[in-house]
């Protein structure tokens, strides 16, 4: 439980961070540290140097962006929960943040750190997928914008390359009057999802015009639910919702572990999707 020795430095600018990443000298970035520090203690990570990026202003805060929102990668869960912009336009973010970790984690943990870490049972990947988020990354070579659905590639694996920094997340405007919900069946000790579903639904004259659902906790990566396409153009009749929920896990390779066997996760998937859709429909205006 004692980390290997390393150097520590606090970054003073974004340029300093990009220079350090470009050097490829074994530097590891740390902001909240809730994912990295446990790995250091177990010596699953042994960087030569830690560079603290928690105090770089360019990486912090929530602001309006083209009727949507921009979230700096270094923004904490507490700041996300307290943002008026997110509360008004993207209440799904706050709903999820209230269930993440404990008080200390929410006060210090950052959205960018969680997204870059890409734990297969974490909450935020599914949320960013249903909100159609863009993830901006930067290096000395230039900038890239990556769709959330393409960013998460496997367990603890993303589209980031070694010299890139996740700088911010862009949330485009949601459909007018859309309702959203998050339903999670969490492992009691850790709080991580055994299965969780994020949903957003919009209606036009009581007919479903937009729907997205994504799942986390089933396997190595968050998944979009393809069966929801059946809802578009319907009035979300109970039999249609039942069919969508029953088929939600189709084509997904579900993994079992000590917390839940694969078949139990498959059952929970249908329950979580139906509950998330019901709640999102109830909130849609």
Image: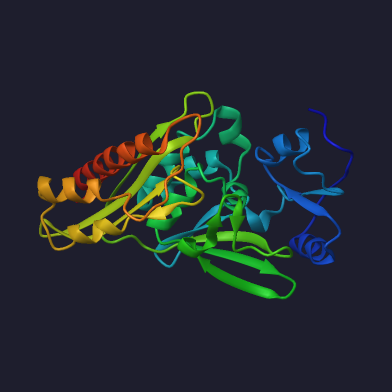
Please state the horizontal and vertical placement of residue 228, each as a whole percent of the image. 25, 56
Residue 61 position, x and y percent, is 57, 52
Observer able to see residue 255: yes
Residue 48 higher or lower than 175, as above or below: above
The answer to whether residue 208 is left or right of residue 183 is: left
Q: Nearer the viewer, residue 145 or 242?
A: 242
Q: Locate residue 247, reporting x and y percent.
A: 25, 50
Quarter location, residue 72: bottom right
**Residue 177 shows up from this direction:** no
Image-based side of 122 in relation to 48, left or right:
left
Specify how the rendered protein is coloured: rainbow
Q: Position of residue 179 (x, y in %)?
A: 27, 49
Side of 26 relative to 143 (left or right): right
Residue 19 is left or right of residue 31, and the answer is right
Where's the N terminus, which quadrant?
top right
Q: Residue at x 35, y 37 (%)?
A: 263
Which residue is more in the foreground, 185 or 74? 185
The residue at the point 88 percent across, 43 percent down is 6
Q: Residue at x 68, y 75 (%)?
A: 142
Residue 19 vs 275, above or below: the answer is below
- Outermost residue, bottom side: 141
Q: Residue at x 36, y 47 (%)?
A: 198
Which of the pair 66/24 is nearer the observer?
A: 24
Question: Residue most toward the top?
Answer: 189
């Amino acid at each position: 439980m004692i980390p290997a020795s390393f150097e520590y430095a606090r970054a003073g600018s974004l340029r300093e961070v990009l220079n350090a990443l470009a050097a490829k000298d074994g530097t590891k970035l740390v902001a909240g540290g809730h994912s990295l520090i446990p790995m250091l203690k177990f010596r699953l990570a042994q960087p030569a140097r830690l560079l603290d990026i928690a105090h770089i202003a360019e990486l912090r805060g929530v602001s309006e962006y083209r009727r949507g929102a921009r979230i700096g990668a270094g923004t904490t869960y507490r700041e996300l929960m307290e943002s008026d912009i997110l509360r008004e336009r993207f209440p799904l973010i706050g709903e999820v943040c209230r269930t993440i970790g404990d008080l200390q984690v929410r006060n210090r943990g950052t959205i960018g750190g969680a997204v870059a870490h890409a734990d297969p049972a974490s909450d935020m990947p599914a949320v960013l997928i249903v909100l159609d988020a863009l993830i901006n990354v930067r290096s000395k070579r230039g900038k890239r914008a990556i769709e959330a659905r393409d960013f998460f590639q496997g367990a603890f694996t993303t589209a980031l390359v070694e010299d890139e920094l996740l700088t911010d997340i862009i949330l485009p405007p949601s459909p007018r009057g859309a309702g959203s919900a998050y339903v999670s069946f969490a492992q009691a000790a850790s709080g991580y999802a055994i299965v969780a579903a994020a949903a957003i639904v919009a209606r036009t004259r009581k007919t479903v015009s937009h729907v997205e659902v994504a799942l986390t906790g089933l396997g190595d990566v968050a998944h979009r639910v393809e069966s929801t396409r059946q809802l578009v153009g319907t009035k979300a009749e109970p039999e249609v919702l039942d069919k969508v929920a029953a088929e939600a896990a189709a084509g997904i390779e579900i993994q079992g572990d000590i917390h839940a066997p694969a078949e139990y996760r498959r059952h929970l998937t249908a329950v979580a999707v139906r509950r998330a859709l019901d709640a999102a429909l109830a909130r849609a205006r």
